[in-house]
């Protein structure tokens, strides 16, 4: 079996798990006191920051699973997303409504191709 790398491991989770050239991680807004659009911008900036730390970029994205507290926010999400996602290199994406904890309005699970 290929080795599994875990970055930022904690008792309940790892910040990033890398296996066979695919990094997986979750992002939520650090400042949850702001509105939905601002949380979305924060989350996507955090995705950029994590990609950079992995020597990757937005074109490396494979999949993003988006959880929102209310599907009524999807127009706001898509406006921020459309300005952020690289033309011609959009990952597969699914959006779901979910009960999110701790004031989160948006949570994203990310998969990206990275060098091992």
Image (cartoon, grey):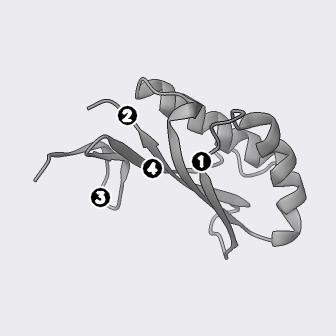
Q: Nearer the observer, disc 1 or disc 3?
A: 1
> Can you identify the residue that label 4 sits on?
25
Q: Position of residue 74 (x, y in %)?
A: 83, 61
Is any part of residue 17 visible from this angle?
yes
> Can you identify the residue that label 3 sits on?
11
Image point (50%, 35%), residue name: 60
Q: Which mark is residue 77?
A: none
The extreme front residue here reads 88
Q: Position of residue 36 (x, y in %)?
A: 82, 54
Q: Nearer the observer, disc 4 or disc 3?
A: 4
Separation of residues labelled 2 and 3 (CA atoms) = 25 Å
Most foreground residue, 104 or 98: 98
> Is disc 2 in contact with disc 3, using a CB cutoff of under 8 Å?
no
* In-image side of 49 versus 93 (left or right): left
Image point (32%, 29%), residue name: 115
Separation of residues labelled 2 and 1 (CA atoms) = 14 Å
Q: Secondary structure at mark 2?
A: loop
Instruction: Determine whether 105 is above or below 30 in the image.
Output: below
Neighbours of disc 2 within 10 Å: few (<14), some (14-19), many (20+):
some
Separation of residues labelled 4 and 3 (CA atoms) = 16 Å
> Can you identify the residue that label 1 sits on?
91
> Can you identify the residue that label 2 sits on?
114
Q: Secondary structure at mark 3?
A: loop
First of labels 4, 2 by sequence position: 4
Q: Secondary structure at mark 4?
A: strand
First of labels 2, 3 by sequence position: 3
Separation of residues labelled 4 and 2 (CA atoms) = 13 Å
């Amino acid at each position: 079996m290929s080795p599994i790398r875990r970055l930022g491991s904690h008792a309940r989770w790892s910040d990033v798990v890398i296996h066979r050239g695919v990094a997986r991680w979750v992002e939520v807004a650090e400042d949850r006191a702001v509105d939905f659009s601002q949380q979305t911008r924060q989350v996507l900036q955090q995705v950029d920051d994590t990609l950079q730390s992995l020597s990757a970029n937005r074109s490396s994205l494979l999949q993003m699973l988006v959880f929102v507290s209310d599907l009524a926010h999807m127009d706001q999400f898509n406006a921020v997303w459309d300005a952020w996602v690289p033309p011609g290199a959009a990952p597969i994406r699914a959006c779901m409504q979910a009960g999110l904890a701790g004031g989160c309005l948006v949570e994203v699970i990310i998969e990206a191709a990275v060098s091992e």
